[in-house]
Image (cartoon, grey):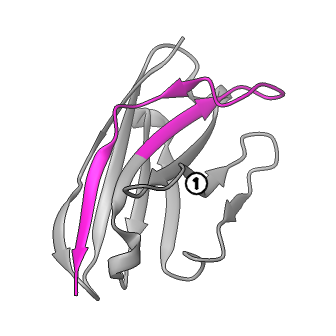
Amino acid sequence: QVRLVESGGGLVQAGDSLRLSCVASGRSFSSYSMGWFRQAPGKEREFVVVFSRSSGSSYYADSVKGRFTISRDNAKNTVYLQMNSLKPEDTAVYYCAARTDGSAWGFWGQGTQVTVSS
């Protein structure tokens, strides 16, 4: 079991940057693949980026590639999402998620709101 708590959201202007954090509680944080997802008003939740524990690689949605960067600090049980060059279409609730190899994304945080004004 792992509990996830996101922070770092806020209201920014287009072109600004934000860094989201997701702190995990529980054991064996390093054994989980971690991901960030987002849900805009009236839309379904969508994938943003995942960091695969097994491959050590990150995979980004085309819409954020080159602007967003995922990183993790296993010593702090924390995963980050650095978001640069934010656009109004990045406005959404951002969720952190975790999964073990071969399983679904079974652990989710409560979400943090990111609003980008034009």
Residue 99 locus on image (x, y percent): 66, 29
**Image quadrant containing the N terminus:** top right
- Of residues 102 and 25, which is closer to you in this image? 102
Among all residues in the image, which is located at the extreme left? Answer: 11
Please tell me whether mark 1 sits on a helix, a strand or a loop: strand
- Residue 115 counted in the magenta span: yes
User: Badge 1 is on which residue?
Assistant: 46
Residue under the image location 33 percent in, 54 percent down: 20
Query: Relative to residue 24, is residue 27 depicted above or below?
Result: above
Residue 80 locus on image (x, y percent): 42, 53
**Image quadrant containing the C terminus:** bottom left
Query: Relative to residue 97, is residue 55 depicted above or below?
Result: below
Residue 6 locus on image (x, y percent): 32, 40
Residue under the image location 66 percent in, 76 percent down: 62
* Left or right for 79, reference 58: left
Q: Specify few, some or many for label 1: CA neighbours under 10 Å numbering under 14, 14-19, or 20 or more.
A: some
* Left or right for 67, reference 83: right
Q: Which residue type carries mark 1?
A: Glu
Magenta segment? 95-118
